[in-house]
Image (spheres, helix red, strand yellow):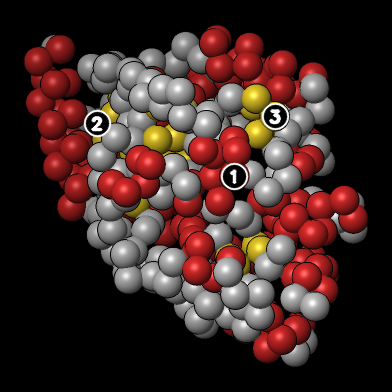
C-alpha cells in the first residue's frame, strides 16, 4: 500500500506542475509546536484587530477538527513574481508614485489558486475513489506557513514569511486536507543564519524579535487589515506605500533566487506597478470598484483605499 501511495504522490507532483504549481510537499497534522507559538503571539496582542486568528479555537492547529478524518496535508507553492515587473524598491524612491505589494498588482490569487487546487483534487479523486478532501488558500483557519515548513516547501524566516532556497519568498501557498496517508516530506531546514536585514529594514520596527511580528506596527496590516484611522505615529514611516509592504522581502538575500510565475495572471494590471498618487486620488468609488475588479485590492474597500492614499499624498509634500 505504501508503494502505491508513493506512486500516487509522484503523479500528484506531475499534475501539480501541469497546473502551474512550482512545488508539492506533504505533512502530517501535528501542529503542536506552531500552536504554542500562536498562543504566545495572541497573548501579546500582536494580532491587532485580526480576531479571526483566535475565534476558531483549536481548529487552526488541529486539521482533523476542521476537516474530519484528515491525516495528511498536501501543501503547494505557487510563484507570483515576474522579473519584468518594475522594481518595488524603485517605486519607494519616487514619492509621487504609490507602492503596492507585489502580490496584489495582478489578479486575486484566492479564486485562481482555489480552482487549480480543486482541479488537482479531482484528478486524485479519479485515481483514489475513497479520497476525501477539502482545499484551502488563505481562506480558512489553516496554519499555512507552519504546514508548508513541515511539508518541506521552505523554512519560516525571521520576518515570519516562508523562504525557499531556490525561490525566495514571492509565492502563495495552497493546501489540500486529505484522509489518505501519503508519504510525509522531509521538513525544511533553517538557513537565515545571523542575517537580520529584514528586521533592520522594517520602516515601523514591526519585527520586534526574530520570528515575531507585531501586526499593530506592520504596514501590511495597517493598510489592509486595520479598520479606522491609522495611528499618526506610523504615517511618516508608511511613506508612499498604499497597499501592503514588501520591504522585508525586498532586502532578503534569498529573493535573488525568486522564480517567475508560470502563469500571466499576476502581471500588473492598471499600471499597479507604478501608479501615480495624484491620479489615484481622483478616483471615485465607482472607478475604484471598476479598476480593482478581480484584484485583491478591492477587499479593503474604498474608504480604506482613500485613507491610505491621503497618508501617501501628505508624505509627498
Residue 43, compared with residue 141, is above or below; it is above
- Label 2: which residue? 129
Q: Please give the name of the residue rendered at 13% of the width and 31% of the height, measured from the top-left corner.
A: 10
Q: In terms of secondary structure, where does tag 1 sit?
A: helix
Q: Quadrant of the N terminus?
A: top left
- Is residue 133 shown above or below 286? above
* Residue toward you, 129 or 282: 282
The residue closer to the viewer here, 213 or 133, is 213
**Under tag 3, what secondary structure?**
strand
Q: Which mark is residue 244?
A: none
Counting other residues with Cα less than 10 Å from the Cα at mark 1, is it few (<14), some (14-19), or many (20 or more)?
A: some
Q: Please tell me which residue is depicted at 70% across the width and 29% down the height of the picture.
A: 208
Picture quadrant of residue 174: top left
Mark 2–mark 3 contact, CB under 8 Å?
Answer: no
Residue position for label 3: 208
Q: Earlier in the sequence, mark 2 or mark 3?
A: 2
Left or right placement of residue 292 versus residue 90 in this view = right
Amino acid at each position: 500500500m505504501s508503494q502505491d501511495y508513493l506512486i500516487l504522490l509522484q503523479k500528484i507532483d506531475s499534475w501539480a506542475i501541469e497546473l502551474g504549481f512550482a512545488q508539492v510537499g506533504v505533512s502530517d497534522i501535528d501542529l503542536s509546536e506552531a500552536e504554542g507559538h500562536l498562543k504566545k503571539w495572541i497573548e501579546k496582542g500582536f494580532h491587532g484587530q485580526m480576531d479571526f486568528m483566535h475565534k476558531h479555537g483549536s481548529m487552526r492547529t488541529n486539521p482533523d477538527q476542521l476537516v474530519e478524518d484528515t491525516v495528511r496535508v498536501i501543501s503547494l507553492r505557487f510563484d507570483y513574481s515576474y522579473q519584468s515587473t518594475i522594481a518595488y524598491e524603485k517605486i519607494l524612491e519616487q514619492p509621487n508614485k504609490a507602492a503596492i505589494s507585489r502580490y496584489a498588482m495582478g489578479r486575486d490569487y484566492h479564486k485562481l489558486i482555489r480552482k487549480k487546487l480543486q482541479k488537482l483534487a479531482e484528478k486524485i479523486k479519479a485515481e483514489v475513489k475513497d479520497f476525501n478532501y477539502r482545499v484551502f488558500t488563505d481562506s480558512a483557519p489553516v496554519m499555512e506557513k507552519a504546514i508548508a515548513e513541515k511539508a518541506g516547501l521552505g523554512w519560516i524566516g525571521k520576518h515570519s514569511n516562508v523562504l525557499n532556497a531556490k525561490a525566495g519568498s514571492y509565492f502563495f501557498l495552497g493546501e489540500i486536507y486529505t484522509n489518505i496517508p501519503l508519504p510525509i516530506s522531509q521538513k525544511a531546514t533553517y538557513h537565515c543564519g545571523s542575517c537580520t536585514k529584514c528586521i533592520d529594514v522594517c520602516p515601523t520596527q514591526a519585527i520586534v524579535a526574530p520570528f515575531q511580528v507585531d501586526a499593530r506596527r506592520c504596514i501590511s496590516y495597517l493598510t489592509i487589515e486595520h479598520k479606522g484611522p491609522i495611528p499618526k505615529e506610523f504615517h511618516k514611516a508608511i511613506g508612499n506605500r498604499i497597499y501592503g509592504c514588501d520591504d522585508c522581502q525586498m532586502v532578503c538575500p534569498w529573493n535573488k533566487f525568486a522564480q517567475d510565475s508560470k502563469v500571466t495572471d499576476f502581471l500588473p494590471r492598471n499600471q499597479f506597478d507604478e501608479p501615480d498618487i495624484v491620479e489615484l486620488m481622483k478616483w471615485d468609488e465607482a472607478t475604484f470598484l471598476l479598476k480593482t475588479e478581480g484584484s485583491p485590492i478591492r477587499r479593503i474597500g474604498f474608504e480604506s483605499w482613500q485613507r491610505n492614499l491621503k497618508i501617501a499624498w501628505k508624505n509627498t509634500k
